[in-house]
Amino acid sequence: MSKVAPAGDMLDEAERLTAAPSVHYDYAIVVPKVSPAYLKELKERVEHAGFVTEEFDALSGQYEVSVLKLGAPQQRLMEFAFAQGVPGRLDPAKLQAAAAALDPPLAFNERPADEHGWSLGSLTEKLALFPLFDYIYAVVRPAKIDMFTAFVDTTRHKVILRMLCASSKLPGAARGAGLDARAMDRVEPAPLLPYKADKSGDGPRISTLILLHDHDKRDALHKEWLGNYKIILKPWEQPINHIRVYLGEQMGFYFLFVSTWATSYLINGIIGLVLYALMKLVPPFNGHGAIHQVPNALHAGLVIIMCSITLQKFKRQQEVCNKRWGANQWADAKPRVRPAFEGLPMTSVVHGKVELDFPDWWRRGRQTVAWSIIVVLLWADLGVVAYVNVLKHQKDEQIKGLANNHLSILIAMCQVQGVNALGSILARILTKYENWKTDEEYAHHLTMKDVIFQLINTFLPQFWVAFIEPMRYDDDKMCPPTNNCKGELSFQIAILFAGQAGYSLAKQAVLPVVLRFLSQRRIQRLGCEDNLGGTEGEPDADWRTEARKDFVELTEYDNIEGPIEDYVELTLQFGYVTMFTAVYPFAPLISFAFNTLQIWMDGHKLLKLHRRPLPLEVRNIGIWEDIFQILSKIGCVTNVALCFFVVDISPIFLNPRYEEDGRRDYQAVKMKLGLFIAFSVGFLLLTTVIEQLFTPVSTAVRVQRARQTIYQQCVLGDRETSAFVNEADAAPDDNSDLASGGHDDSFDIMAALRGG
């Protein structure tokens, strides 16, 4: 429940109204021109919540709309922030001064008198700690407003969005406009049927909420980030802080994730090339037999270890960003109800109030139906894979001039891409059918369906060739050398991986062209190539033109389903890398190239082709961490299985007596199975040890969180500092250089442009 500020912490109403407003017009509401009564109602609601508004028109004729731009004065933002428990960042210099003014002070000016003791400076250097007073967050308090820094763009956007969605019935500064932002996406620039008024003279009660682009900052970020090919080719140098400030934490974490894995793929790819050259050029590895496959097996083992380390490294970087951005402090927000949710009035068993919900037993029935449909389709998919692999062994050509093995690969590629596309659509339909109440629940269950379906469909052909196909041979022959199982599997992986990458790149490359084409056609259809509805000499003409362009030329970005699609593509790439490197060592390098290109395409799409995404209050990438963790564990088993049953390095470990006349007897098979189990368990244990050694939360983050708690309690609260005493003899120490990192412009997008 929202917290209401006590009277002592409320700004005086007269002071608030007479203070010089610092207003950022970040949002706009678009309503059909034929709905003036609804526009008036919206205007009254947002102004009652404390917003400043300005109204103007866009387009003309039957497609004309009214645009209501919204701004919130800085002091009103701070009032609401305190009433809702919104965190703000404390100014390091002012926090240091306030801490030093306590009695006794928190001055950090002592060190152990013992010469063997560790001083604060030594510990800071050893543990790579944060500066003493940097990145400290606390709930905004108007009584100490001078200690807080101004909200960065994305934080301001989140506060304003909360104001728009908060109930208008809340008392005092906690009141909002009571709007359902998720449902405000129904007005389009050029609908198939123009909006018309009904018999009463009023039009439809529909609207679209837009987070407007700041065109100067957008262009600066585009120039710094996407206009610099050196940064694109160096994924470890992505301007993550600037991306987060402009596009929000959700996109900041996403691009941190992509850039981290792109860097890892580059390292793994270079190692793979070196080992591949070793296998081809350096004796004895360039010969034949099991020793020839050792570089491949070694590369697979290194990839398993590197993927585990990379995942832990990302988690650490994510926690560092979480601390720098104050994302954890937003974790207690009430989940948003989906507009498509169809609830039934039910008495809450928790607080006794009547609420709209959906019975769990009813939803479980729908879930059973949904997953049953998915299982049936996957069984049908297995039948198609079996038919394709039987087809390639038939002697008679099905299509004249096209060999059956080539035809089977072509069918498999079409089957993988086509069924993935249909499965993604089906996952959305089934998840909507399950009728989840909140965005978080909907996204979680959509992700599970989409990922499971696409992973199984994508890798089923490879698993068939690797582990089912050899069963057609006699038990004592396994995969005879004459059949070249590794070569067949490598060829299929190369074709399907290339098809997957090509399909994704084509979609990423074609989509911008299609969106731009539709935008131009829309403008031509509206007859506003030269004028988007403004009048000559109107006030604030440039700003209004930019707002009109955001509505007319750009398309809405779904920040629930859009990222899921992008993450699924990354998941499929990761599957190829982590599960099949033993037979296809080029997978990491291809994934690096794809991820690098995807960074540019996704960035360009978000900055130039879509409206600015509405901010989500997130603190990490969510379930995707678990998905990649599970895939890395599966990769341990599949790579070991490939090494012993397809690549077959077992003769290195087996006694020669197990091989007679080129036949592997029953004992050899048992030994190979034992080696497979031993190495699989060994790699699983090794990755578990890596996870325990490289914990997600580093010492630096833990220490800064502990400092933050003390500052909140002692500097902003009423806790005494007398509890903090020296437990050993102390000597004076000067730690002024550890107080703060100085002026932090890492969140200033325009600084990069000024520096250039």
Image (cartoon, grey):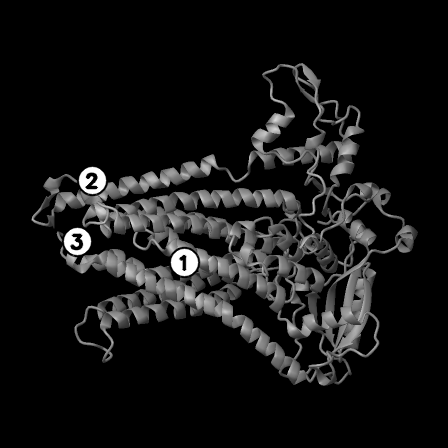
Picture quadrant of residue 601: bottom right
Comparing marks 1 and 2, which lies closer to the viewer?
1
Determine whether 737 is above or below 391 in the image: above
Tag 3 secondary structure: loop
Position of the C terminus, as image quadrant, is: bottom right
Residue under label 1: 590
- Residues packed near mark 2 inside 10 Å, few (<14), some (14 to 19) or many (20 plus): few
Q: Which of marks 1 and 3 precedes in the sequence? A: 3
Pick whichever of labels 2 and 3 is earlier in the sequence.
3
Residue 97 sits above or below residue 420 on the image: above
**Which type of secondary structure does the marked residue at label 1 adopt?**
helix
Which residue is under mark 2?
Answer: 653
Q: Amino acid at mark 1?
A: Ile
Q: What is the quadrant of residue 728 in the picture? A: top right
Contact between marks 3 and 1 (CB within 8 A): the answer is no
Image coordinates for residue 755, horizontal then vertical, percent: 68, 52
Q: Is residue 725 above or below residue 84?
A: above
Q: Amino acid at mark 3?
A: Met
The numbered mark at residue 478 is 3
- Kindly identify the residue that appears in the image at 81 percent across and 65 percent down: 53
- Cβ atoms at labels 1 and 2 below 8 Å apart: no
Estimate how packed mark 1 is, as few (under 14), some (14 to 19) or many (20 or more) residues with alpha carbons within 10 Å: some
The amino acid pointed to by label 2 is Phe
